[in-house]
Amino acid sequence: MKISYKWLRELIPFDMDVSQLADRLTYAGVEVEAVEELDGPSTPSTELGTGPLGDRPSTPLGASDWRLELEVTPNRPDCLSLLGIAREIRALCGGEIVQPDCLVSEAGADANSLAKIIVEDKEGCPRYVARVITGVKVAESPEWLRDKIESVGLRPINNVADVTNLVLYELGHPLHAFDLDRLADRTIVVRRAKAGEPLTTLDGVERKLSPEHLVIADAKRPVALAGIMGGADSEISGSTRNVLLESAYFDPRLIRRGGRALGLKSDASYRFERGADPLALERTADRAARLIAEVAGGQVAKGRIDVSARKFPESWQVELRPERAEKLLGIRIPVERMLEILRALEIGAIRTGDKITATVPSFRRDLEREVDLIEEIARVHGYDKLPDDHAPVWSVPARTRPKDQNLRAVSQAMAGLGFSEHYGLPMSDPERLQNLFPKSEPVRLANPMSSELSVLRPSLLPGLLEALAFNRNNGTADVRLFEAGLVYLGKGEQPPEEKPMLGAVAIGNSSPVSWDRNPRVYDFFDLKGDLESLMAALGLEAETSKADGGAPSWPYRGRAAAVVLGRRTIGYAGELDPGAAAALGIEGRACCLEVGLAPVLEAMEAGRGRYAGIPRHQAVRRDLAVSVAEGTDYGAVKSAIMEAGRPELESAELFDLYRGEQAGPGRKSLAIALRYRPADRPAADLQAAQAQQRIVVILGKRFGAEIR
């Protein structure tokens, strides 16, 4: 979010320069990512401010202004406004906030007789408030209004639209203005869109909607995407005379899903997704109606139209124990200082015996527990004041467990194959999961940070693919990532099962661009080769076979394999289904791997990962060409060869595949190099011949193989 330094000082006078302000806000948890200097008008002035924000000394217009770009965490939607930042400044350094004037002068007919509001989807829109302003004259905004709009990086449009944007940045609640006379039957209907229903939004794009979209419609057609963007058919224009001003509360999940489905973001959706204050509707509607009447020359109709399907709590109480705060913070903060901090944040606080009873306002949805209040006190009091005087203690060398050593070996082997390690969050987005695992029922969090991180991840792939897409969209063509971490599988009412997994994704070319070779796209066979190299580096013998009915839904059929270790399927590898890739915004052939780490580590600890020395004896090579049915899996053929050829047989490698007349209809020819080398003696031709005969017999019995 972007704010203006000068505009902020109109709401709360303070003595800090812009650099000090940026530091204080960042230390208090509202990070200032960038500061940009803006040039003011060329003519200096020291006149009193005469705009509707109040008559008080203004900053000289010739002086520079600064635009601060803030990174507001998802749990702090109250800071998505200048008024919210003013509250932070009051708590940090004192001062009094100059509250925006929301007093409305009403005249004419009652608003309820001029327009009608029908809310069909009461879950999607629990509350809708509207004001009507008649007799407006739409024109260019006055200079003071244009200056404020431009100071936060917006483009002035007209006096009505600019007022709604001003109030959005000032008070933090999105508004939308409709041309009342362009609404069929002067009616607003809040409902779900019909499948394929068209709407041309304010950006001039016609969009096809679906029932997952919440729309604002009139009696005939949609006129806006609720909480996201208005429609072109009802926008304010030079011919507008009567305005219906919308101030509503929408379900954050619906707004997020609807915007994501259309790839559409706006200042309004950014705030609605994080949870607007349902009790701020009247104030923002009144503030905007007052300013529209002032700058556009209209009059505000009597009363508001207020359609509510649910009653929202105005506040709730949380108890705080000062001694608990002292134990958690390691510092004693006087109770009076705690009360001062809470009250400056507009949290009602009184001392009752040995406790503080805090009354939390509706705009602070993030404050539910005692520890939340302690965090507020700590950040405002100053994290730099927390003690850092721990005495040094003697340390003893840590003993690394074999399991940890083996886990490190897995990471080192993946890094050696060219993969970069990724560290993802244990939480995931349920919508992204549906693209990869449509039938999954992930473990939902009782108190999520946001709706986009509301479930525990049942797989590592969604996070890895999101990182892959991010890197591709930022210009990195060849991406290879891996992660070793826990996934969480739901078990009904029981606690979720934690399962260690290894995941990997890759996209781009199989090798760096070079003058002596043509680039080739990384594909399933490259992934299979990397998997075999990983297992060889760990001293394990894993095999791949056709993905059976237990395979997940994300692999592209025909380009997937089950990973088998000791006759146990431990995971799957394959190319990502093109439909899932498109839904995740990935262009190209992405390859994925996910295997269970537990059986891999168990096999390494059991000694199956021990390394052998360099062979002392020369090997004997024999080639074998067999014809098998077209659908025969080479992995199964190789397993049978190794089983029949031991102990003399060391390896079997496919070096040629032929399909044609000589192989026969519906058949293929496999040419396999067999390397014989017993571990304890030189290889003999007779022993190699006997082992090869055993191989031929078992291939004939199991696969109907014919020697060529």
Image: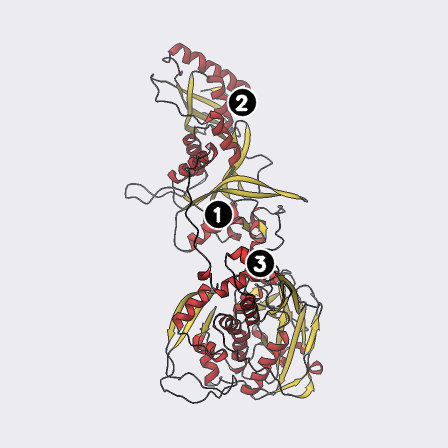
Q: Nearer the viewer, residue 566 or 384?
A: 384
Q: Which residue is mark 3?
A: 323
Q: Amino acid at mark 3?
A: Glu
Q: CA distance from mark 1 to mark 2?
A: 39 Å
How far across and how far down the image is residue 331, in percent? 50, 59
- Graded by Cα atoms within 10 Å as few (under 14), some (14 to 19) or many (20 or more), the crowding at tag 2 reads some
Question: On the image, numbered disc 2 is attached to which residue?
Answer: 703
Q: Residue at x 39, y 74 (%)?
A: 17
Circles 3 and 2: CB distance less than 8 Å? no
Crowd band around label 3 with a 10 angstrom C-alpha radius: few (<14), some (14–19), many (20+):
some
| Observer able to see residue 110 | yes
Task: Report the amino acid beneath label 2.
Answer: Phe
Q: Quadrant of residue 113?
A: bottom right
User: x%, y% of residue 682?
Assistant: 36, 13
Position of residue 144 relative to residue 561, above or below, is: below
- Label 3 residue SS: helix
Mark closest to the chain's N terminus, 1 or 2: 1
Q: Where on the picture, by quarter, is residue 221?
A: bottom right
**Secondary element at image label 1:** helix
Chain-order first, disc 3 or disc 2: 3
Q: Which residues are magenta?
A: 678-684
Q: Is residue 534 above or below residue 698?
A: below
- Between 397 and 581, which is closer to the camera in this rendering? 397
The amino acid sitting under disc 1 is Leu
The scheme the figure's colours follow is secondary structure
- Residue 38 appears at what percent x and percent y? 38, 76
Give the dominant element type of the magenta stretch: helix, strand or loop. loop
**Contact, CB < 8 Å: mark 1 with mark 2?**
no
Residue sitting at the far left? 515
What is the C-alpha distance between the residues marked 3 and 1? 43 Å
Frontmost residue, 613 versus 146: 613
The residue where tag 1 is placed is: 464
